[in-house]
Image (cartoon, grey):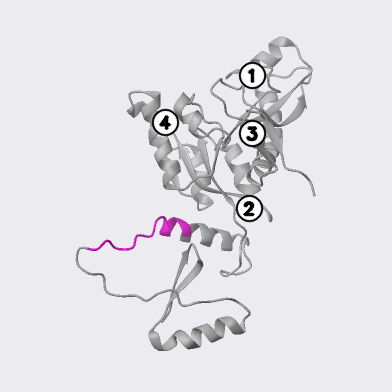
Amino acid sequence: MARTFNCGVGVALVVSAHQVGLVLSDVRLRQEEAWVIGTVVACPEGCPRVRIRHLMDAIRADRAALKNGLADSPSSVRPKQARVAVLISGTGSNLQALIHGTREPGSAARVVVVVSNRAAVAGLDRAERAGIPTRVIDHKLYKSRVEFDTAVDQVLEEFSTDLVCLAGFMRILSGPFVRKWNGKMLNIHPSLLPSFRGSNAHEQALAAGVTVTGCTVHFVAEEVDAGQIVLQEAVPVERGDTVATLSERVKLAEHRIFPAALQLVASGTVRLGEDGKLCYAQQE
């Protein structure tokens, strides 16, 4: 009986010695490549054993992908995708948009973990239904913002995160955390930045009497809502709008541009340069 493991070389098959030649021949007949890369031996006493990180999480994610028709077969080859962590605090409607976007054919990203600073929020249910691992890190249990951010960072490292998306994450992040993830962290804000920064953007827009507002996806900088802008979409302010009605209309735009902005960054089309300015990949 053969056992299969995903690993850095692609897939490793563990087979009995008398099956090696047969398996190699069969794989090569299918115009695939295969090599003998080692043997399985008894672990000597005192030697460290092989550890497989996130095995069950990977199995659940693959099962969810197959169930949703995201792979033609268990052996289908997928291009490398950026590993994305999404930080949330509430309902997770933007998280849902990111999940849908990253499961489109050709997506350059996939969501590998969802982290919430609040337990029992709807966003965690969305992640679990999608087969995505979740973690709850209650900010109230930490003495300082830096300690909380360190706990979050440990989860990001645990899941080998490449990019971070703040999707309704209602915490201001510390300087060390932002600097570490500089150029790798995106936030969505419900206004056309640099107008109406802060947590009450819709109230500000209505009070100012503007006829157009919108939403912005930007790289996260140490100054709140001040990072380089990746993508924006304008939304008209209608006569008689309230905070609630305007918010719902802006959310629809958010759900469009957040996945699009993530795709731009994950694919390398847009990146943050060393000078802090946006760089764009040259079109061939």
Q: Are marks 3 and 4 in contact (CB under 8 Å)?
A: no
Q: CA distance from mark 2 to mark 4?
A: 28 Å
Tell which of 94 and 280 is nearer to you: 280
Tell which of 27 and 100 is nearer to you: 27
Residue at 68 percent of width and 23 percent of height: 191
Q: CA distance from mark 2 to mark 3?
A: 28 Å
- Residue 52 colored magenta? yes
User: Which numbered tag is attached to residue 149?
Assistant: 4
Q: Position of residue 115 (x, y in %)?
A: 46, 39
SS of the residue at dot 2? loop
Rendered image quadrant of residue 183: top right
Q: Position of residue 170 (x, y in %)?
A: 51, 27
The first of marks 1 and 4 along the sequence is 4
2 vs 3, front mark: 3
User: Which numbered tag is attached to residue 10?
Assistant: none
Q: Amino acid at mark 3?
A: Gly
Q: Which residues are magenta?
A: 47-58
The first of marks 3 and 4 along the sequence is 4
Task: Provide the residue designation for mark 2.
Answer: 103
- Residue 32 colored magenta? no
